[in-house]
Amino acid sequence: MTDSCMEIMRLRAARIEEHLGVCLRERAIPGRLLAAMEYSLLAGGKRLRPVLCLSSAAVCGLEEARALPFAASIELIHTYSLIHDDLPAMDNDDLRRGRPTNHKAFDEATAILAGDGLLTEAFVCMAGVCLPPDRVLAALGELARAAGAAGMVGGQMLDMEYTGAGKADIEALAAMHACKTGALLRASCLCGALLAGAGAEQTAALARYGAAFGAAFQIVDDILDLTGTAEQLGKTPGKDTTQGKLTYPSLLGLERSRELALEQTRLAQSSLDAFSGPEAEFLRDLARMQVKRIS
Ligand code: GRG
């Protein structure tokens, strides 16, 4: 990543961090619930999805501060999904973002409510965006669709069905990933464009970028589960194998999986061919950085 891109990433992530630190504070949330919600929310994730949202808005000409509450709402939804994914009834994980999972630090019922609280408060954040209502509604609809039963939640259902079953093929795996992880990453970019009031072509290009970025992201995630350490990942590695999960490396091996991640990264970058300038360069660089990440 170039120095200027590193600087944009650092500044945007810091801005998001600051907003996340206060966004739940004015709400009358019971103390233990707020503590559980902030325990996971403020545990230092990469903030990729809100950065993608702000950057997609910026490449379409919107001042990033105007999209900040919406970008934060995406991180709230992402954090809820991590808390619920870690629950004993799902992946039953002990470690997330480098610390004990929410149900380990609190208890199972509190972790369920913390996830529910984050998901619902996300809509409070979205409703507070000061932009033309038609843009906010369009983005809200896309984000809800991406997070919902035909998106992330549906993808999680398919993931559970495929685990240990050994019956799905590469097309089924790609479709499952597109829902489970890809939908929220795609929506992060698409919503940035919608909030900026971008035209149809720019909006479609950013949706394509986000979908390819999401595909590459999940392939890298599958690879890191095999090659990363708990220290690097902040979560328990090797769980995909022990749980019998359907992954790219399990179907195609590591080498072909790496090639596919690079193919999707190039696709993401070429989706932005019609854009120029430093914001477009940043998004291309972010895709390049993502495929090389170790955490
Ligand atoms: C339980 C409704 C529900 C959905 C769960 C997204 C998801 C579906 C589960 C998360 C489990 C997982 C490890 C998915 C793989 C991809 C992924 C979302 C990784 C975590 O995202 P990062 O790397 O995490 O952006 P940070 O902590 O940096 O935000």
Image (spheres, helix red, strand yellow):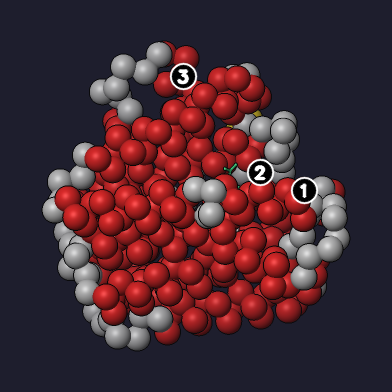
> What residue did someone put label 1 on?
239
User: In the drawing, what numbered circle is on residue 33?
Assistant: 3
The answer to whether residue 219 is above or below residue 258 is above
Residue 107 shows in this picture: yes
User: In the drawing, what numbered circle is on residue 24?
Assistant: none
Q: Is mark 1 within 8 Å of ligand 1?
A: no
Q: Is mark 2 within 8 Å of ligand 1?
A: yes
Q: Is mark 3 within 8 Å of ligand 1?
A: no
Q: Is residue 151 left or right of residue 161?
A: left
**Which residue is at 32% across, 59% downward?**
191
Q: Is residue 210 left or right of residue 228?
A: left
Do tag 1 and tag 2 residues touch (Cβ < 8 Å)? yes
Quarter holding the C terminus is bottom right
**Which residue is at 46% across, 59% downward?**
185
Dot 2 falls on a residue whose secondary structure is loop
**Which residue is at 36% across, 33% downward?**
121
Disc 1 vs disc 3: which is toward the camera?
A: 3
Pick whichever of labels 3 and 2 is earlier in the sequence. 3
The crowding category of the residue bearing disc 3, from other C-alpha atoms within 10 Å (few below 14, some 14 to 19, many at least 20), is some
In front of the other: 264 or 151: 151
Pick whichever of labels 1 and 3 is earlier in the sequence. 3
The amino acid at mark 3 is: Leu
Disc 3 vs disc 2: which is toward the camera?
A: 3
Quarter holding the N terminus is bottom left
> What residue did someone put label 2 on?
235
In front of the other: 294 or 29: 29
Do tag 3 and tag 2 residues touch (Cβ < 8 Å)? no
Residue 117 position in % (x across, y down): 44, 28
